[in-house]
Image: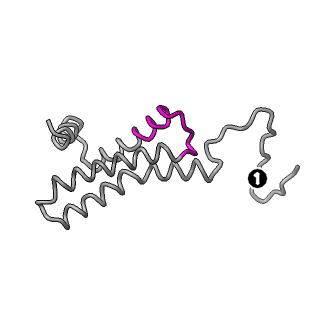
Amino acid sequence: MTWYELKDLVGFYTGLEQDALHVHAALALYILAMGLFRRSRRSRVPWLVVLGLELANEAYDLQHNWPDGPDWALHSSAKDLWNTMLWPTVLLFVGRYTSWFQRPRPGAEPELRAEPGEPRSG
């Protein structure tokens, strides 16, 4: 069984379109790579793992789809790359450049938040 046939089989049995499979596979690979390489959400390594596997997948797809027309094959690969890398990229940027999803440090004072229209105290 070829890689292309395996992807079609997964799509058939899950009932998901290939675009949705790209999104689900990317998130699963990203989380798996974080655990496998013991990296935090701030690390580029899981993102690079997903990118490398997606580029290999698209190289295979281009080889398989090129006879259908280079324009269609390139458009399809670009769409797949977008679908695959969007959420891992968002998660990487959130992890690196925001404090979202961070646990408070032990012993740190909780941040005081003023209600709208009230001055901040402290």
What x and y, as percent, mark residue 83?
Answer: 35, 53
- Front-lying residue, 79 or 49: 49
Q: Nearer the viewer, residue 99 or 64?
A: 64
Where is 43 relative to 83, above or below? above
The mark total stands at 1
Q: Does the magenta stretch include residue 41?
A: yes
Q: Which one is in front, 15 or 55?
A: 55
Looking at numbered disc 1 in the image, what kind of residue is underneath it? Answer: Glu
Task: Sort mark 1 into few (<14), some (14-19) or many (20+) by Cα contacts within 10 Å.
Answer: few
Rendered residue at 47%/32% (across/down): 36
Q: Where is 38 relative to 55, above or below?
A: above
The residue at the point 49 percent across, 32 percent down is 35
The residue sitting at 21% across, 52% down in the picture is 61
Q: In which quarter of the image is residue 73?
A: bottom left
Q: Is mark 1 on a helix, strand or loop?
A: loop
- Circle 1 residue: 115
Q: Which residue lies furthest to the bottom in this view?
A: 71
Q: Does the magenta stretch include residue 30?
A: yes
x 49%, y 37%: residue: 34
Residue most extreme to the right: 122
**Scheme by which the image is coloured:** one colour
| Residue 43 left/right relative to 13 | right
Residue extent of the magenta highlight: 29-43
Q: Residue 106, percent across and down?
A: 76, 32
Residue 60, image x, y percentages: 22, 50
Locate the N terminus and report the quarter of the image it occupies: top left
> For this rendering, which residue is in front, 78 or 59?
59
Residue 118: x %, y % from top left:
81, 57
